[in-house]
Image (cartoon, helix red, strand yellow):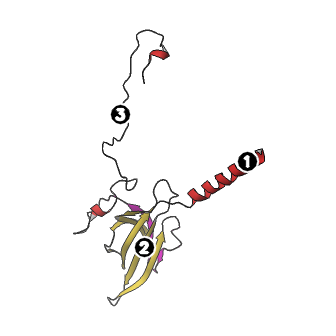
Amino acid sequence: MRGLRIRTLLVSATALTLCFSGVEAAPIENPIAVFSGLDKVTGRIISFDVYIDETVQFGALRVTPRTCLTQPPTEEPNTTVFAEVDEITLDAKIRRIFTGWMFAASPGLNAVEHPVYDVWLKDCAVKSSVEPPPGFAIDEYAQDEMGVIERPEGWFPLPPKRPYRSFDSGTIDLDTIED
């Protein structure tokens, strides 16, 4: 009888573990992708912020992020961007040299490697010192650093202070304290 209970308990625990391990939170869409770029001629590395669907020129490259995703803080960190990178050739033509996903955790995996410039994803951001392009709908994205949080009415950032009672004597009668 006891062996059956233990077996039932183990099966239940395994089922719960399998049930919850497959559940993942949806990624958070961010309005800004943060890239780093290397100019191999000068050896300078710069960091630059690009709003989603905005095109920014870095040397002879034009970088356009289409989406920048991060995981919620409850999940394993994973920052990705889907980007398009074009090269402006010497004869003033635009040639697509990269379309795909970049991963901040593995910058060498899908970084843009060019004879003169390299570009890779550093992070996604919610805020930037760079002004958004005209018509950019910043309200469509999460405004909280921790992601989209649905806050109930009457929500406080910290719990309200609990009323307390001061006791003048050095002893406290636990039976008379009210919760």
Looking at the image, the residue that sits furthest to the bottom is 91
- Dividing the picture into quadrants, the one containing residue 90 is bottom left
Return the disc, 2 or 1, that comes first in the chain's sequence. 1
Looking at the picture, does residue 87 appear above or below residue 119? Answer: below
Residue sticking out furthest to the front: 1
Q: Amino acid at mark 1?
A: Ile
Question: Does 124 appear in magenta?
Answer: yes
Residue ID for mark 1: 6
| Residues in magenta, as a range | 104-128
Q: Residue at x 72, y 47 (%)?
A: 5
User: Label 2 vs label 3: CA separation?
Assistant: 43 Å
Q: Amino acid at mark 3?
A: Pro
Tag 2 residue: 82
Q: Residue furthest top?
A: 169
Mark closest to the chain's N terminus, 3 or 1: 1
Residue 178: x and y in percent read 42, 21
Q: Residue at x 56, y 56 (%)?
A: 20
Q: Reply above or below: 175 against 132.
A: above
Residue sitting nearer the eye, 113 or 50 = 50
- Quickly name the residue at label 3: 160
- Given this view, does label 3 or label 1 mark the residue nearer the observer? 1
The numbered mark, 2 or 3, whose residue comes first in the sequence reads: 2
Crowding around mark 3 (Cα neighbors within 10 Å: few <14, some 14 to 19, many 20+) is: few
Mark closer to the observer (2, 1): 1
Please name the amino acid that badge 2 sits on.
Answer: Phe
Q: Quadrant of the N terminus?
A: top right
Q: Height in image: 73 above or below 2?
A: below
Residue positioned 48% across, 16% down in the render:
175
Q: CA distance from mark 2 to mark 1?
A: 49 Å
